[in-house]
Structure formats: C-alpha cells, structure tokens
Amino acid sequence: MQPSVVNDNRLNVPILSVDNLTVIRSGNIVLKDINLKVCKGEFIGLVGPNGSGKSTLLLSILGVLRAQKGSVEIYGQPPFSRSTIGRIGWVSQAASNLPRDVRITVRELVRLGTLNGKNMFSWSDKGRVKRVNEAIKMVGLEDVENVDVSRLSGGQRQRAVIARALATEAEFILLDEPLVGMDREARNSLLKLLDQLCHDSDKTILMVSHDLTAIRQTAHRMIFLEEMIRYDGPTENFPDLESLAGLRGIRPVHGEDQSHNHTHLVEGE
Amino acid sequence: MGLGSLLMDIFSPLMESIAPLIPGEVFPYFFTMELFQRALLAAILVTIVAGFLGTFLLIRNLALIGDGLAHVSFGGVAVGIVLGATSPLWYALVFSITASILIHEMQSREILTGDASIAIFLTGMLAFGLVTLRLKGGGITTDIEGYLFGNLLLIDEADLDLISFICVFSMLLLIFIRSGLLATTVDPISARVQGLPVRGIGLLFSIITAAVVVSMVQVVGTLLVTALLVTPAATAQLVGRSFRSCLIWTQVFGLSSVLLGLYFSAEYDTGSGSMIALVAAIIFSVVGLFQFLKSFISTIFSTENILDSTS
C-alpha cells in the first residue's frame, strides 16, 4: 500500500493546533515546546521510542492531561468545549485496556459511543440505532455484533472500539497503539480500514504506533517525537532507520508556517 | 407512614397467598408472620439492588469496596449504640457515605491507588468501633453480633423503612444513570471525550454503594456483605454473554441464594446471613465447575488444531 495522493483543498481546514505545549509529569519534562497543526483529512503517524511522550501528547490533546505551558485548540476551542464534544474520537489500546470482568457485546459497546451529556438518561434509542448499525458496518463486524467482546480476536476487538468512536460521529480520531498484538493480516486490514475512513468518510486520523513499517504504508505525514518533535513531514521523506537513530541528537528547524513540505533537519549541539 | 410499611401493606397479602405452597416446617413462617415477612422483604430488596450494583463493582475492579464500607458501617453502628441511638443504622449511613467519598477522592486524585485506601478505612473504622464499644458500651453483645453476622429478625419497622428507602431510591438512581455508568466504567477517557460527567457519575456511584452496603448490614452482616454484592454478579459473568444477560443472571443467582439460604437457615436453625453467603458460594462453585467441564469436553472433542484453539 503506497501513501495515496492527498486532495489538497481539504488540507486547508485546520482542526487541531498545538502551540508551545510543555507537559511535566511527576517532575519530569515529558513534552517540551510542541508545535503542531493538523488539517482536515490528514492521516498522521506519530512515532517515537518508549516514554517519548506519545501518549502524553494524545492525552493533552484530549484535555485529560493539563499542560504546564502552551495551549491546545481543537476547532479553535480548548478541549471539552461545548462545540468540540462529540467531534473527537478516542481509540485506546483496547485489546489490553477493556476491563476483563465485563461481558459486553459489540453492539452494546458501540451503543455507548452514541451517548452524550444530554441523552444519557433517556430511555429511547431513537435515531441512535441507525448510527450503531452504520458504525458496525463500517468496521465490518456485522457477523459478530452480538458476540461478547472478550471472545473476539485482538483485531476484531480493536475494530469494535473503533466502531464505538465512529458512533460518536467523531471527525477527528486519535488512536493509541491500535496495532499492538495483531498478526500481519489483521494489521493490514485495520490499516486499510483507517485509510478508507480517511479518504472516503473524510475523517482525520492521528495514530500512535510502534510499528514503523506498518504506519509508513498508510500515513501521509509522519511525526517523530522524543520530548520534542524531531521530524514532522511527509512520509516519503521520513528518514530510514539508521538516520532515525541519529535524529536524537539532531534538531529540526521548521519553516514559519509549519508547512510539512519545508522540513529541514539540521545538526544540533 | 414510611416506605417500609407501605411495601409491607402491598406484599404481605401476596406472601400470605403463596404461603401454602412453601415447603419446610419453619420456612413458611417467613410468608405468614409479620416479623418474618419484614425479614424476607428486606432480604429480597437488598438482593435486587446489590446484584445490580455488584455487576458494576466487578467491572470497576472494586469487588472489595463493599467489604471495606461494611466495616466502616460497623464502626458507625457501634458509635450509634454507645450514644444510645434507637436506629444506629443512621450513624452507619453517615460513616459509610463519608468514607466512600473520601476513598473515591483519594483514588481519583491518585493520592493512594488501588485497594490501599479501602484497607485503611476498613481497619481504622472497625478498630474505632471496637474501642468505643470497650470504653463506653458493654463490649460485644447479642445486639451487636446481629450487625456483625446479620440477624434478619432484629429488623424492626423503623429499620425496614430505612432499608426500603435506601434500596428503592438507589435502584431508581442506578437505572437512571445506567448507560452513563456503563460508559464511564468501560472506558473513562472515551466517556469524558464524549462529554459525559465522568466525575459526577463516579461520585454518585460511590455514594449509592455506601448507602446500599448500610442497608445490607442487618441482612447478611458486616462480615458477609460481599456475598450478596459480588458473588451473584461474579457467577453471572460465567454464564452471561452480554451485559444485559449478565444483569438478569445476577438476579437469578442472587434471589436463589437468598431464598435457599433462608430456607436452610430456617429448617436447620443456623444464622441466616452465613447460610445465604454459603449458598451463594456453592452456586458459584457449581456453575464454575459446570462451565469448566463444558469447555474441557469441547476442547477434547474439538477437531480444531490445538494451536488454533488457544489463539
């Protein structure tokens, strides 16, 4: 799978803007001066070594973690604003993160995605059933929709959690290591699904992954994070493994407009 | 007139009408005599709410919070008795709710994670109760033993009013917040991103748990609260295949534990609380063994490759 050519006019609609974000967790600087802009329709792969702050960045974007410095704006608003609720979807490392002592079917899980502050007390599922059906269909789990999630394979379970995010009608989907514990076949079909969501359904995707090879097949844009953003640019210019190791001592210099076609890598101290 | 007397007015004729069908020599009294009817009604009310609550406790990995709060309640009961209160359950209610809010805050602010905060409250408040009893009261009397091991026949009208009020109100609240509660239980971050009031739901759930535990203290006793709170829900996880079916199975296992437990305790003159807890544990074992044998047999006769079936 080659990264497909992106329709350029979609890229002008900004969705996320992170400015000078610094996050300190239990006394350690985890993220330092992060600047990041994401536009509609992008498929971004976020990579970096263990403990490089990838998950911290996602949680800060969601507003779950508070930043010490800098700001995050989604659709021009801080996280958790009235207008951003329901437009962002979160897909955790579901294979390992769903509680173990729960029997819940795919359909029951996806239905939880249709809840919001207003309808959570209501009895009727009117209008929600359709969204649930569509989300299940999009991820191709119609055959197992009444099966307990814990009996599914890792790949199916991950799809179920993605369907839950789709049922929220989120436009911007953040995924934390969705490929963990999957065989090659499941991994490829999940990447294909994400690629379709991005191209056919106009979703914007920011995905954290360890699996460099896999994510390079699909993402349009790559970000290498280790406390700071060390690389941010198109996938085809992403450095190979040897130069990547060298990147740790190398500081990126961004152009004024953060445009990802103007990324230079310059030797640091 | 309290809620307890109202429920008694409704259910006591019903109980009397089915009394002739009830087996046993002593057990039918539970359906005919007022004192016993009150006990049966309290036991059934408590079981229904406890099962519903327990399913969520289990998913939230809080199986032992019931035990912790029950010990805290006992501390409250002891203080109430020493102060000469007619209904010491009110003291238990205040103690239990305060402790549950503190435990919830400590866990959600990550001051103390996991079970440590529960353990501290459990032992601290139990010790407080025991010391108070030694200093001011007469030590462990039969009255107090009733709260430790449960004594259904000590439930008077005022107690039933309080128990019914807690159970009915908690059940209504739980039904009201069930979807949001499930969403925040399964995936708190997603729920928060969707705009659900995760903190509020968590706090409300803690308060409901604390109140329900207090209502259970007289029925099964401080030491055995977990038997009705967790065991039926855990048994249901073995057979249920969806969240909805687990809720139903929980009620089936919970109510059969209570009815069988009361039957055996009445016929063989053992404590009701301990018999209910024992029956609940036996049901769990039998269902667990059955499920194990079922999966064992299906693996033996399966035509699949062993490597495939483990994946």
Image (spheres, coloured by chain):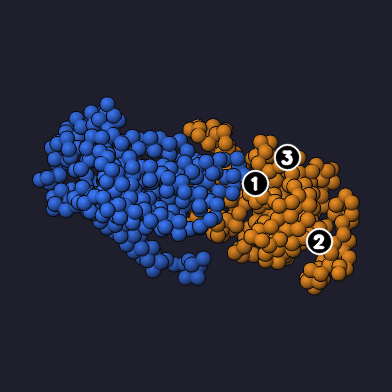
Chain colours: A orange, B blue
The residue sitting at the front extreme is: B135
Q: Which mark is residue A89?
A: 1
Callout 3 crowding tier (Cα within 10 Å): few <14, some 14–19, many ≥20: some
Task: Tell me the mark number nearer the camera, choosing from 2 and 1.
Answer: 2
Task: Tell me the mark number nearer the camera, choosing from 3 and 1.
Answer: 3
Identify which amino acid the numbered label 2 is placed on: Tyr
Q: Which mark is residue A231?
A: 2
Q: Is residue A263 visible?
A: yes
The chain ID associated with circle 3 is A
Q: Position of residue B47 (x, y in %)?
A: 31, 44
Give the SS element for disc 3: loop
Identify which amino acid the numbered label 3 is placed on: Gln
Q: Earlier in the sequence, mark 2 or mark 1?
A: 1
Tell me how far mark 2 sits from mark 3, CA to CA: 26 Å
Tell me how far mark 2 sits from mark 1, CA to CA: 25 Å
Q: Which residue is mark 3?
A: A77
Q: Is residue B25 left or right of residue A110?
A: left
| Rendered position, A126 above or below B74 | above
| Rendered position, B285 above or below A125 | below
Give the SS element for disc 2: strand
Q: Earlier in the sequence, mark 3 or mark 1?
A: 3
Q: Position of residue B252 (x, y in %)?
A: 31, 46
Q: Quadrant of residue A55?
A: bottom right
